[in-house]
Amino acid sequence: YHSQNFDSLKTNYLDSKNLQNQNLIELTKDKKNWKWLSLAPNLSVSSSWDPFTGVYKPMVNITFSLHNISTFLQTNARNRIEREKLSIQLQDHLNADINSIDAEIIDIQRDSIALIFEEKNIKLLQELHTIKSKQYEKNQINLEDKINNEITLNNRINEFELRKINYTN
């Protein structure tokens, strides 16, 4: 029963973390930017005076900047690499979380099994106490043995109850 609960909790946690990680990566991928404008050509309009004709001649210049194009391509490549690094880091953190969760689950399962065995031992001690009480009533053992048995039983019950409280917290 515990194993199914742990598995479903772990699965829900992993699904949630994977979705968060994917959303974070998508945010870095899809952020709006105007870098594509660096690919746009430069456009300039001017006019010059032609002394022979005595008229202003309009001129339109269109230029492309190789520097802007190379910067755009480098930035895109760097952003892609940074997204991949982020993805790897997020996956590493998730793997560390998984290992931590698995260790915690194992601890809880081990403690649960130990409590079950301890509860069985207390039941045996209670049966032994019943036997010792009957022996005392028949004068087969002295009062000191009966009291030591009661003290042992009470101590074990108290220890068990404390472990149960620690386990549930």
Image (cartoon, helix red, strand yellow):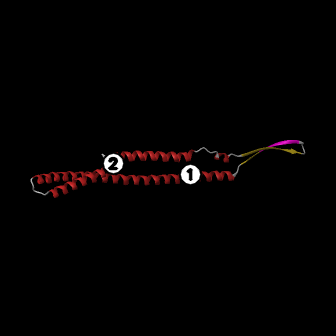
Q: Are marks 2 and 1 in contact (CB under 8 Å)?
A: no
Q: Nearer the viewer, residue 160 or 56?
A: 160
Image mark for residue 69: none
**Quick one: SS at disc 1?**
helix
- From the viewer's perspective, is residue 52 above or below residue 151? above
User: Which range of residues does the magenta coloring cover?
Assistant: 55-60
Residue positioned 39% across, 52% down in the render? 101
Residue 56 among those drawn in magenta? yes
Q: Position of residue 128 (x, y in %)?
A: 16, 53
Q: Tag on residue 80?
A: 1
- Picture residue at 33% right of the left edge, 46% below the top: 4
Dominant SS in magenta: strand
**Which residue is more in the foreground, 146 or 94?**
146
Which amino acid does the dot numbered 1 rest on? Arg
Query: Mark 2 Cα within 10 Å, few/some/many (few <14, many 20+)?
Result: few
In what quadrant of the picture does the N terminus appear?
top left
Q: Amino acid at mark 2?
A: Thr
Answer left or right for 166 relative to 144.
right
- Identify the residue position indicated by label 2 in the image: 168
